[in-house]
């Protein structure tokens, strides 16, 4: 009988078991399926095998979690999110603010434009999607002082404070 399945129903200790005689696999009346080898195993071996299977599945789950975490882009590596909040915690207004990448000899334009950064105020600057991370900052205050800070890493910094 090629292609046919021969099953035998037996009644053992209060449960019905259907055994496939071609594969040796079993199906109990309560929905459990076995590989046909549990007849030769003791209860202790089955428990140990189930614990091992749980450990293997836990290992697979941990590997998936680690892989998913490594796929995510960290803020330091993100070219799109190079935003820095500039805080003026001094007692003077910042009237001009410049930022140039370290390979540039020119301060270029005033980022604040017509605006100023008053005492206690903040401004968020997006440094764009370029591959540059290191910038020099220059702040000009209303009392005439100028403060230059070199090599600020905008890929790793989210807040930059001007303090006295």
Image (spheres, helix red, strand yellow):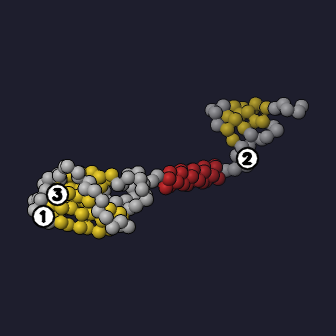
Q: Which residue is mark 2?
A: 37
Tell me the quarter of the picture where residue 27 sits: top right
Q: Which mark is residue 56?
A: none
Residue 150: percent from left, percent from top: 29, 69
Inter-mark Cα distance, 1 to 2: 87 Å
Q: Which residue is mark 1?
A: 144
Comes first in the chain, label 3 or label 2: 2
Comes first in the chain, label 1 or label 2: 2
Inter-mark Cα distance, 3 to 1: 10 Å
Q: Is disc 3 surrounded by few (<14), some (14 to 19) or many (20+) residues within 10 Å?
A: many
Residue 159 appears in the picture as rendered: no
Q: Quadrant of the C terminus?
A: bottom left
Tell me the quarter of the picture where residue 74 sits: bottom left
Q: Quadrant of the N terminus?
A: top right
Q: In the image shown, does 46 or 103 lie closer to the viewer?
A: 103
Q: Is there CB contact under 8 Å for labels 1 and 2?
A: no
Q: Residue at x 40, y 61 (%)?
A: 132
Residue 17: percent from left, percent from top: 71, 34
The mark closer to the camera, 1 or 2, is 1
The mark closer to the camera, 3 or 1, is 1
Q: Secondary structure at mark 3?
A: strand
Q: Secondary structure at mark 2?
A: loop
Inter-mark Cα distance, 3 to 2: 80 Å
Q: Residue at x 64, y 37 (%)?
A: 32
Q: In the image shown, does 109 or 37 lie closer to the viewer?
A: 109
């Amino acid at each position: 009988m090629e292609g046919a399945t021969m099953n035998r129903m037996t009644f053992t200790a209060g449960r019905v078991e259907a055994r496939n005689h071609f594969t040796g696999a079993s199906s109990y009346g309560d929905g459990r399926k076995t590989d046909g080898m549990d007849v030769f195993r003791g209860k202790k071996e089955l428990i140990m095998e189930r614990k091992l299977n749980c450990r293997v599945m836990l290992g697979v789950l941990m590997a998936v979690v680690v892989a998913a975490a490594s796929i995510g882009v960290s803020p330091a590596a993100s070219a799109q999110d190079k935003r820095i909040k500039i805080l003026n915690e001094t007692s003077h207004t910042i009237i001009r603010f410049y930022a140039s990448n370290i390979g540039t000899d020119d301060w270029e334009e005033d980022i604040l434009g017509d605006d100023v950064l008053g005492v206690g105020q903040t401004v968020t600057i997006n440094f764009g999607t370029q591959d540059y991370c290191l910038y020099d900052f220059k702040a000009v205050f209303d009392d005439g002082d100028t403060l230059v800070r070199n090599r600020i890493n905008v890929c790793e910094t989210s807040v930059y404070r001007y303090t006295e």
